[in-house]
Image (spheres, rainbow, N blue to C red):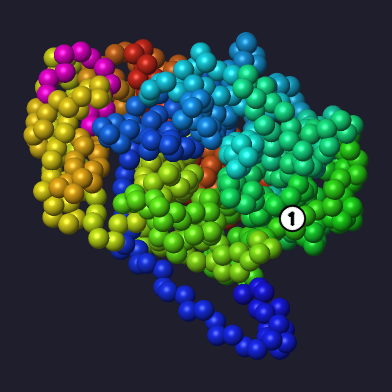
């Protein structure tokens, strides 16, 4: 690995010293993944509280708390949010002094004053396919909000909100919001922000369209490369007791410098979706998402690269001009379709008419890891596939921690890198200069399905939020889990079921714990909470319960073995009028189609009330690898949508057409269906 040449040269000058013998890491069988919430909504972020409760968010605004003492997942709050593409609730974090102040931080897209401030779609969507011209989009302006709220018991008190910082954005266009929140050892708050730039009309290369009359949202120079803009950045601030903030010394630009924002710690980032601050060293382990180009183009620039960097000082990381100091993009004139020279990464200049900041930018800083869609020679351990880099935490082993779930010292000091599209976690070993010297797989036999967020808890266990396979929904694989080091004793595996599942109050359900086992054969104790009020309603393995009121319930079974280890599972139940059942009559999976075809749809809805077809919404999503891009929406039980590939994905592999139908009835219950079509020849 890197560093071996230098080590070899030193060996010529000093007596040879035997290499240390490293013990093999513990086997995967010494660990156990324990599900905490199997129904997390569309999962976005997690934060572990000092007492072991786990906050976790869903994009549509829900903040839940996993409560180990009862096994419940309590809805702590529903934050009203603006939803479009990636926007909604993003990051969540716990104040370093939470035990005294109970502050919880959230980054989200607020609902603004009028419907015009909250556009759902481009103005002509569902009509002719848009081509990215300014006429396709209304000039909506909004912002993303960093706030903090008091957590009182299991309730996030929305009325206690202190609004700390707003990041202005262009609404209704897409994409890249970032949104991770973390703290360093001195209590400074770090926030990542995306470039808020539409990438789909740049051929998969750098989006720097300065054409006259062009919507500025297609030019990342207005955000990531703009020293006077908070987007495409890593921000560092210090929050004061009243919710305002100051800027600590040592950021990229000194306070008072013209055409700069002093909050900026690092700039030149595309979508730094996940990072973690090592509170022992102050180093930020940050990952930045890749553009979509699958091949280099001498007229445009390199293939799309994901990046991981150990940010140990303020810096400019180059987007949209450079991937790294030696990997520039090509200056391209979108109006004339002509290419210029490669950008100068040592002396980058922002000449965009959309730039409000400094013209001359700091030199582009090196990154520790760059990789793309193929298996690279420099980091073959990262494999090949989609590019979804996520910067995770470094584990700090504490021998004083007596938790039975504590991870061993083998992982100490190694930041975790996880891949959203490749479904794995890796451990990076670093030298004194934070260069990667070794990459090792972490628990490869344990499934991590589109890992969305990672955090080591105060108990030394790893907490994982998984998104699962699918688009803008609570996918079947989505879950919150805890990964324990458990070489000698395992936690029970809990299963629940119930029948019947349809009926109105009074409604009696026969519950079952069939399938619940203890891997060690320990004796088990059962505790059922049928109405999620935190009280034990039955200690029988297979009880019955009568619901006297209609409503939605999360019946919880907590199972404890004879050694005190416990786990829980929930059974979701709707008592009352049933949710609508939605299905596609057409199109059907496997149906022939080619991009450019107009696909007729017919949706069947079955409900216990008259169906209003005006409330049926059908969305066409361009499926790409394991993610998707909503492109068109239509209403009605029947209609048609023209499929197309936006320019940013032309020539890309792994494309398909996804149609999602959704219907909400008069009682507010929603049903949905999805069908995926593969283009002819696939």
Residue occupying image coordinates x 76% and y 47%: 314
Q: Nearer the viewer, residue 307 or 422?
A: 307
The answer to whether 125 appears left or right of 93 in the picture is right
Residue 354 visible? The answer is no
Segment colored magenta: 545-556
Classify 10 Å Cα crowding around label 1: few (below 14), some (14-19), many (20 and above).
many
Residue occupying image coordinates x 38% and y 30%: 65
Give residue 155's position: percent from left, percent from top. 40, 21
Residue 575 in the image: above or below residue 132: above
Give residue 44's position: percent from left, percent from top. 49, 37
Residue 649 in the image: above or below residue 507: below
Name the image quarter holding residue 360: top right
Secondary structure character of the magenta stretch overall: strand
SS class of the residue under badge 1?
strand
Give residue 152's position: percent from left, percent from top. 42, 20
Q: Which residue is mark 1?
A: 323
Residue occupying image coordinates x 42% and y 74%: 23
Residue 573 in the image: above or below residue 659: above
Give residue 260's position: percent from left, percent from top. 84, 34
């Amino acid at each position: 690995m890197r560093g071996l040449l230098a080590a070899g040269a030193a060996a010529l000058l000093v007596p040879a010293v035997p290499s240390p013998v490293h013990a093999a890491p513990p086997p995967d069988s010494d660990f156990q993944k324990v599900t905490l919430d199997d129904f997390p909504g569309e999962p976005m972020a997690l934060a572990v509280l000092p007492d072991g409760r786990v906050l976790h968010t869903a994009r549509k605004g829900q903040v839940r708390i996993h409560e180990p003492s009862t096994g419940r997942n309590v809805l702590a709050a529903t934050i009203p949010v603006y939803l479009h593409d990636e926007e909604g609730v993003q990051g969540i974090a716990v104040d370093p002094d939470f035990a005294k102040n109970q502050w919880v931080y959230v980054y989200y897209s607020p609902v603004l004053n009028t419907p015009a401030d909250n556009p759902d779609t481009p103005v002509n969507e569902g009509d002719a396919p848009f081509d990215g011209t300014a006429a396709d989009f209304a000039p909506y302006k909004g912002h993303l909000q960093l706030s903090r709220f008091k957590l009182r018991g299991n309730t996030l008190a929305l009325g206690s909100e202190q609004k700390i910082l707003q990041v202005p954005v262009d609404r209704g266009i897409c994409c890249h919001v970032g949104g991770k929140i973390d703290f360093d050892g001195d209590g400074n708050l770090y926030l990542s922000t995306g470039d808020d730039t539409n990438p789909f009309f740049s051929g998969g290369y750098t989006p720097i369209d300065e054409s006259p009359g062009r919507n500025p949202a297609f030019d990342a120079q207005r955000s990531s490369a703009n020293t006077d803009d908070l987007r495409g950045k890593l921000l560092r601030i210090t929050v004061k007791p009243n919710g305002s903030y100051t800027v600590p010394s040592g950021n990229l630009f000194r306070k008072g410098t013209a055409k700069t924002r002093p909050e900026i710690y690092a700039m030149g980032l595309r979508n730094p979706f996940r990072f973690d601050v090592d509170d022992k060293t102050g180093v930020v382990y940050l990952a930045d998402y890749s553009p979509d180009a699958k091949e280099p183009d001498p007229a445009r620039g390199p293939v799309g690269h994901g990046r991981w960097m150990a940010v140990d000082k303020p810096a400019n990381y180059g987007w949209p001009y450079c991937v790294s100091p030696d990997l520039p993009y090509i200056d391209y004139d979108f109006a004339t379709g002509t290419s210029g020279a490669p950008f100068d990464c040592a002396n980058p200049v922002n000449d965009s008419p959309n730039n409000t900041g400094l013209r001359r930018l700091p030199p582009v800083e090196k990154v520790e890891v760059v990789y793309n869609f193929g298996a690279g020679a420099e980091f073959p351990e990262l494999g090949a596939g989609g590019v979804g880099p996520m910067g995770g935490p470094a584990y700090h082993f504490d021998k004083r921690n007596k938790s039975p779930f504590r991870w061993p010292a083998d992982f100490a000091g190694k930041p975790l890198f996880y891949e959203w599209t490749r479904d794995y976690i890796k451990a990076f070993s670093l030298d004194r200069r934070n260069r990667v010297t070794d990459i090792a797989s972490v628990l490869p036999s344990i499934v991590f399905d589109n890992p969305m967020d990672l955090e080591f808890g105060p108990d030394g266990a790893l907490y994982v939020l998984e998104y699962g396979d699918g688009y803008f929904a609570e996918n079947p694989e989505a879950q919150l889990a805890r990964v324990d080091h458990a070489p000698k004793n395992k936690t029970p595996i809990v299963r629940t079921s119930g029948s019947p599942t349809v009926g109105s109050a009074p409604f009696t359900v026969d519950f079952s714990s069939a399938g619940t086992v203890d891997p060690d054969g320990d004796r088990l104790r059962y505790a059922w909470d049928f109405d999620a009020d935190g009280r034990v309603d039955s200690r029988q393995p297979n009880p019955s319960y009568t619901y006297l009121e209609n409503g939605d319930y999360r019946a919880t079974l907590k199972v404890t073995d004879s050694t005190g280890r416990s786990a829980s599972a929930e059974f979701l139940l709707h008592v009352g009028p049933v949710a609508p059942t939605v299905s596609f009559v057409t199109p059907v999976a496997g149906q022939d189609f080619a991009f450019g075809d107009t696909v007729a749809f017919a949706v069947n809805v079955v409900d216990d009330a008259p169906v209003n077809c005006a409330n049926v919404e059908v969305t066409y999503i361009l499926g790409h690898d394991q993610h998707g891009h909503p492109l068109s929406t239509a209403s009605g039980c029947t209609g048609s949508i023209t499929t197309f590939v936006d320019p940013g994905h032309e020539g890309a592999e792994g494309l398909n057409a996804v149609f999602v139908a959704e219907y909400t009835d008069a009682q507010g219950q929603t049903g949905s269906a999805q069908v995926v079509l593969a283009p002819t020849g696939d």
